[in-house]
Structure formats: C-alpha cells, structure tokens
C-alpha cells in the first residue's frame, strides 16, 4: 500500500469519519492512497480546472539537482509524500504550476504547526520542506520534474 499525505477539502465530508486528519486552512489529509481515492469521488476538486502533481522527497537528501537517472531509480531514491492539486483555471504554464507546488510544499505553508511531523517520520524522510533533489510528477503528462537550485528541470 502506498502511504503518503493526500489532501482534500473539508467542505464535502462527514466530520464523523474517524480516519481523516483535520488540517488548517480547510484541508484534510489521508494517510493511504485508497482512502484518498475514495474521498476524491466525493468532492469536486477534480474538475477540469485542477491539475494534479505527485510529490516525491529524496530519501537521503544530497541537495543536488536530480538527473535523468532519477527516473529509473525513483522508487529506490525517493519516497512518495503526497498528491497535490493546483488550481489551473487560468491555464498556467507548467513552470508556474510547479512553482505553486514548490511554494505549497514549504514546511511553513503545509505544516505550519508541525502537523506533518508524524507523516515525515513515518515515511522515513528527513525534511518537511521541498528542496533541491526532490521530484514532482505531473499526472496529466506523466512528466517528472526535478527540483533544481533555480526552478525545475525536466527529467527523462
């Protein structure tokens, strides 16, 4: 089972569901993919204006830009952290969308009070904030992008 943090929005959920974890700013998190997939069918965030990205953090951060070899070794070198929706109703460039993912994945944004600490420890990763060496997959195109010292680089 693939574990990670899958965000959804609280407005469409029954608060009596014990498996959900409440996050600030109207977000909720699920720690298994099957819970998130089931929940996704119940809310309206997967509309045409939303673009989804999978976020992978380096298991042993070296803070070096990933290269094409990262594509083949991703399952060994990185850990899936979460599936992130980005509002794309204005049809933004992929670079702009990736910057939104990067911004959201800074610890002070997605875990301002340490909400993700237990997830980070459970996944065995060593950092909460996205940084150089981490990888993002665009679910629309399947393209992998590596976090570089300035922006992202296309992998593969």
Image (spheres, grey):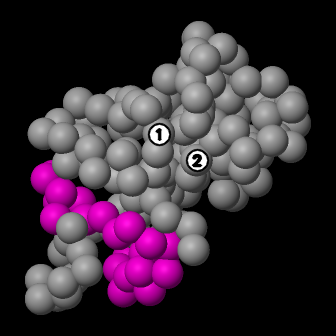
Q: Is residue 122 left or right of residue 66?
A: left
State which region is magenta: 22-44
Q: Position of residue 84 (x, y in %)?
A: 46, 53
Per the rendering, the mark at residue 79 is 2
Q: Which residue is mark 1?
A: 125
Q: Residues within 10 Å of mark 1 (few under 14, many from 20)?
A: some
Helix, strand or loop at mark 1: loop
Near-viewer residue (93 or 20): 20
Q: Which quadrant is the C terminus positioned in?
A: top right
Queried whether the magenta region covers residue 53, the answer comes back as: no
Per the rendering, the mark at residue 76 is none
Q: Is residue 100 visible?
A: no
Q: Is residue 13 visible?
A: yes
Q: CA distance from mark 1 to mark 2?
A: 7 Å
Q: Residues within 10 Å of mark 2 (few under 14, many from 20)?
A: many
Residue at the image position 50 percent from the left and 23 percent from the top = 131
Near-viewer residue (148 or 49): 148
Asked if the residue at tag 2 contacts the one at tag 1, i.e. Cβ–Cβ closer than 8 Å, the answer is: yes
Q: Quadrant of residue 65?
A: top right
Earlier residue among tags 1 and 2? 2
Residue at the image position 12 percent from the left and 83 percent from the top = 15
Helix, strand or loop at mark 2: strand
Near-viewer residue (121 or 14): 121
Q: Which quadrant is the N terminus positioned in?
A: bottom right
Q: Is residue 136 left or right of residue 12?
A: right
Q: Position of residue 66 (x, y in %)?
A: 73, 24
Q: Is residue 38 above or below residue 47?
A: below
Instruction: Give the farthest residue toward the top.
Output: 149
Queried whether the magenta region covers residue 35, the answer comes back as: yes
């Amino acid at each position: 089972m693939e574990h990670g943090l899958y965000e959804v929005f609280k407005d469409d959920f029954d608060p009596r569901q014990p498996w959900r974890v409440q996050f600030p700013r109207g977000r909720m998190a699920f720690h298994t993919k099957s819970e998130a997939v089931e929940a996704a069918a119940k809310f309206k965030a997967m509309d045409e204006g939303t673009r989804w990205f999978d976020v992978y953090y380096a298991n042993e951060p070296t803070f070096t830009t990933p290269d094409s070899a990262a594509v083949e070794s991703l399952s060994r070198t990185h850990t899936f952290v979460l599936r992130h929706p980005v509002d794309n109703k204005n049809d933004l460039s992929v670079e702009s969308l990736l910057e939104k993912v990067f911004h959201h994945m800074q610890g002070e944004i997605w875990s301002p009070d340490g909400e993700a600490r237990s997830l980070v420890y459970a996944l065995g990763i060593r950092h909460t904030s996205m940084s150089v060496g981490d990888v993002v997959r665009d679910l629309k195109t399947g393209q992998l992008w590596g976090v570089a010292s300035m922006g992202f680089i296309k992998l593969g």
